[in-house]
Image (cartoon, rainbow, N blue to C red):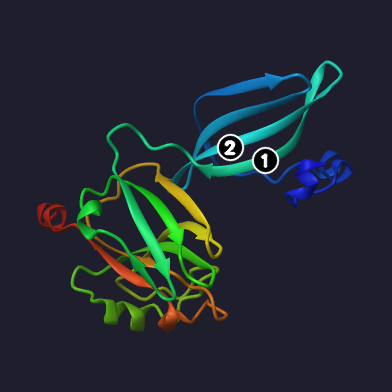
Amino acid sequence: RGLEQDGMGTREEILANGLEQQDGEAVGQPSATVTGDDASATLDIIAGLGRYRLTFALIRDGDGWLIDGLEVAGAPHGTGVPVVEVRAVDYAFGFDRHAVESGDFTIHFENAGMQEHEMALFRAPADATVADALTALSSVDGGSYENVPTGYEAVGHLLFATPGETTDFTFARPLDPGRYLFVCFVPEGGMANLGVAGVKPLVRPALARSSG
C-alpha cells in the first residue's frame, strides 16, 4: 500500500509490470532496523550528479518482508565537506559564493518564497554575466533541457522544493573547474520563463586559471 501511495502502482500492477528501472550505483552496504512486524532499510546510491539515501519502509509477511514505502533524500555529506546554505526567494538564490569555490560541497536548500523553486546546474562561458545567461537560456526547455545555446552546458537537475520546504543535495563527486549557474525554470509556466527565475553564477577563479 505504501508504494501505491507513492505513485508506483498497486501490488497487482507491480507484480505484473515490475518497478521502473533506475540507473544507480550502490555505495557501501545496506542497513536495517527491525521493530516487531515493522522494519526499515537504508541504502546509499550514486545516480547522475548526486548521492542519495533510499529508505524503505518494510512490513512482515510471514517469513519475509514487503516494501511498504520509499523515501529518497540526499545522502549525508562526507567528513570535512562544507555545507552551503542556499536560500531561494521569488526570484533569486542567495548563498556565499566563496563557499563553493572548491567545487566540493553539499547544498542545504531552503525555499523561502511563495512559489515552488528548483535548482538546475548549467555550465557557462568563462566571461558570461548574469544578464548574458538570462538572455542565452531564455529559450531552454526546462523539462528536457533542449535548445541549450552554444557555449552553455546543461549539467543536470539538482533538487526541487515547495514553499517553506528544505532539502539537501550531495554531489557524487566535486565539480570540474569552470563557471556555473544555478537556474530555476519554475514557476509561471516555467520552461521558457527564465526572466523571472533566479540565476546565480558560481565562480571558481583559482581553479579556472589553473585549468588553462
Q: Nearer the viewer, residue 138 or 79?
A: 79
Q: Which percent across, then down, holds residue 45? A: 51, 36
Q: Which percent across, then down, holds residue 23? A: 56, 43
**Quadrant containing the N terminus in the rendered view:** top right
Residue to which mark 1 is pinned: 70
| Secondary element at image label 1 | strand
Residue at screen point 49% across, 54% down: 166
Residue at screen point 35% across, 42% down: 173
**Quadrant containing the C terminus in the rendered view:** bottom left
Q: Which percent across, then down, holds residue 38? A: 75, 25
Q: Is residue 172 visible?
A: yes
For badge 1, the amino acid type reads: Leu
Residue to which mark 2 is pinned: 54
Q: Quick one: which residue is furthest to the right in this view?
A: 12
Whether 112 is drawn above or below 42: the answer is below
Please tell me how many numbered marks the rendered image carries. Answer: 2
| Secondary element at image label 2 | strand
Tell me whether circle 2 and circle 1 mark residues in contact (CB < 8 Å). yes
Question: Callout 1: few (<14), some (14-19), or many (20+) C-alpha neighbours within 10 Å?
Answer: some
Residue at screen point 49% across, 81% down: 192
For badge 2, the amino acid type reads: Leu
115 left or right, relative to 9 = left
Whether 1 is drawn above or below 109: the answer is above
Marks 2 and 1 sit apart, C-alpha to C-alpha, by 7 Å
149 left or right, relative to 210 = right
24 left or right, relative to 50 = right
Whether 98 is drawn above or below 190: the answer is above
